[in-house]
């Protein structure tokens, strides 16, 4: 076959996909999640065509849940991109409403179409090198596993599954599979109609119009954020809008602290001057707004227990209640305590209040390490009735609703105080159960909510104003001193 030169101009693509160099991205799973009309499907067709022209030996499987939807959607969309690029001469495309659904490229590459409901047809397709699962929110996890298995074996070029969908539900398996953790081999991209320069005014108007008519549609199709179907305790609309506002911002720092013990055997004192921040992309502490001189901070912490394996902490600037850092990890208690110690010292010796329900170990250990700024609660001794002062915050049937109600109010009135998307995410699956208790939906967590609620609650036990600067007396350089200074032992201040 003669060689064909094709000139592809950058103008034919939406920038967001080129910015991440997705035409050449070799991740096993290329996950394009986003709102309506954000250019996901068109880009999927573009990438498929691009690869089919440059690489040989491809058999692409294009899928939807239901076979009868294929012709009107993916088949038409691919055809449109082929014609748009003036490549129709290189492709064999059957025409007619009842014709077979397939496409063949002059170089031997093939595109096959199948619905997951067409089990017999699917079975007969082998040697797949690339899959495009369109409207993947229609698929069950089991469908995805089966497809994943199909994409095995040796192929001349990298194998990839392109997954495109709208985020129809915050409890959808696609979220847990690809977004709640870093899945190996997955690249995820979030887009909205604002990323699509080709979308016409009319479509934009429809999407934006949902704002006043249908908050759910607005979240999913305009903002491209996970939709909330049931009733949540936090205002889902406000939380979703805040998540959308935070999307494009890159977090400031991710990492953890290193430090030295004065005595590595007894491990009873951390050398404060040895505490150092280490940047690490996979780090479990995220700092959104770095420490500022003389600003008082508070830290609320939640230890693992009660069905959760996470240790969490939220740091607030106590002058305004703004969330400036978050800790989120499955460490053991020792490591958690050490990191809390370092984080507290780093944030100007912050007031730390840790939940005391499941384990008082971190609270006691912080005390043993000489951390002297812990939240103090009053507790009544069950035998003597005497009021005792104890470190740590205790959530119980009386205190838990109070701190949560306070956080609900903060989210409603000042959502801009919250900077951590995983915390906001938890708010979208925080519901009231049949007994009236506010808790995470099954399979979801609330540890980030609780530590943030505790942090807000303990604020009143710490300064809320920036500390006055400490006056440092500097000795003048020798040449500027006069004799008098030396005589009375005083210095001229500068
Ligand atoms: N690269 C492009 N060149 C020309 N037109 C484009 C391009 N990308 C998107 N469009 C136009 O924008 C429209 C919406 O894009 P697309 O269908 O890819 O969005 P989507 O994210 O898949 O939307 P949905 O979530 O509704 O399926 C297309 O129908 C097409 O008209
Ligand atoms: Mg689409």
Image (cartoon, rainbow, N blue to C red):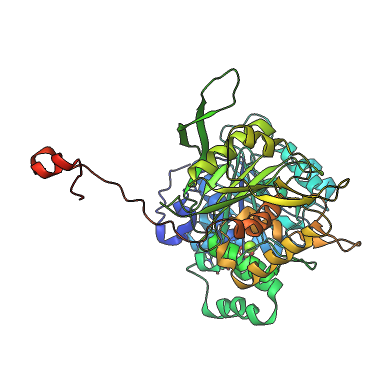
Residue 453 location, quadrant: bottom right
146 lies above or below 405: above
Q: Position of residue 449 (x, y in %)?
A: 69, 55
Whether residue 24 can be seen here: no
Of residues 259 and 239, the one nearer the viewer is 259
Q: Quadrant of ligand 1?
A: bottom right
Q: Position of residue 149 (x, y in %)?
A: 74, 37
Of residues 345 and 49, the one nearer the viewer is 345
Left or right of residue 64, residue 338 in this image? left
Left or right of residue 172, residue 257 in this image? left
Residue 236 location, quadrant: bottom right
Q: How many marks?
A: 0
The residue sitting at 11% across, 44% down in the picture is 484
Whether residue 136 can be seen here: yes
Spot the residue most to the right: 435
Of residues 433 and 46, the one nearer the viewer is 433
The residue sitting at 50% across, 63% down in the picture is 84
Residue 367 location, quadrant: top right
Spot the residue most to the front: 488
Q: Position of residue 278 (x, y in %)?
A: 47, 35
Of residues 218 and 304, the one nearer the viewer is 304
Q: Position of residue 157 (x, y in %)?
A: 56, 35
């Amino acid at each position: 076959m003669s060689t064909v030169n094709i000139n592809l101009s950058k103008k034919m693509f939406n920038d967001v996909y080129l910015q991440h160099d997705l035409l050449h991205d070799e991740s096993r799973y290329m996950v394009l999640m986003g709102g309506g009309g954000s250019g996901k499907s068109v880009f999927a067709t573009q990438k498929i065509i691009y690869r089919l022209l440059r690489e040989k030996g491809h058999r692409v499987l294009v899928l939807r849940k239901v076979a009868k939807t294929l012709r009107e959607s993916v088949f038409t969309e691919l055809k449109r991109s082929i014609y748009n690029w003036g490549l129709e001469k290189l492709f064999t495309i059957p025409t007619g409403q009842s014709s077979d659904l397939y496409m063949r490229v002059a170089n031997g590459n093939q595109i096959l179409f199948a619905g997951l409901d067409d089990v017999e047809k699917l079975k007969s397709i082998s040697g797949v090198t690339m899959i495009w699962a369109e409207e993947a929110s229609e698929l069950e996890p089991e469908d995805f596993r089966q497809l994943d298995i199909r994409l095995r074996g040796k192929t001349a070029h990298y194998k990839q599954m392109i997954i495109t969908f709208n985020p129809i539900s915050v409890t959808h398996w696609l979220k847990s599979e690809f977004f709640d953790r870093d899945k190996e081999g997955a690249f995820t991209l979030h887009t909205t109609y604002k990323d699509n320069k080709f979308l016409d005014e009319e479509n934009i108007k429809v999407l934006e119009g949902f704002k006043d008519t249908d908050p759910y549609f607005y979240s999913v199709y305009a903002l491209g954020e996970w939709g909330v179907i049931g009733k949540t305790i936090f205002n889902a609309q406000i939380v979703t809008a805040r998540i959308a506002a935070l999307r494009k911002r890159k977090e400031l720092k991710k990492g953890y602290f290193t430090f030295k013990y004065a005595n590595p055997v007894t491990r009873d004192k951390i050398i404060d001057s040895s505490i150092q921040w280490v940047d690490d992309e996979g780090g479990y502490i995220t700092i959104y707004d770095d420490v500022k001189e003389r600003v008082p901070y508070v830290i609320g912490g939640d230890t693992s227990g009660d069905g959760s394996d996470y240790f969490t902490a939220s740091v607030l600037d106590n002058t305004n209640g703004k969330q400036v850092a978050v800790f989120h990890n499955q460490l053991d208690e020792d490591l958690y305590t050490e990191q809390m110690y370092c984080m507290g010292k780093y944030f100007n010796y912050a007031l730390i209040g840790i939940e005391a329900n499941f384990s008082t170990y971190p609270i006691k250990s912080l005390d043993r390490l000489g951390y002297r700024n812990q939240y103090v609660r009053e507790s009544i001794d069950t035998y003597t009735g005497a009021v005792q002062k104890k470190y740590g915050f205790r959530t119980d049937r009386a205190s838990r609703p109070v701190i949560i109600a306070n956080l609900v109010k903060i989210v409603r009135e000042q959502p801009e105080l919250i900077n951590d998307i995983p915390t906001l995410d938890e708010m979208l699956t925080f519901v009231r159960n049949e007994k009236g208790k506010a808790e995470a939906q099954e399979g979801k967590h609330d540890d980030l909510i609780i530590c943030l609620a505790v942090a807000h609650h303990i604020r009143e036990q710490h300064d809320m104003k920036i500390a006055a600067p400490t006056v440092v007396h500097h000795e003048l350089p020798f040449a500027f001193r006069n004799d008098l200074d030396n005589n009375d032992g005083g210095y001229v201040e500068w």
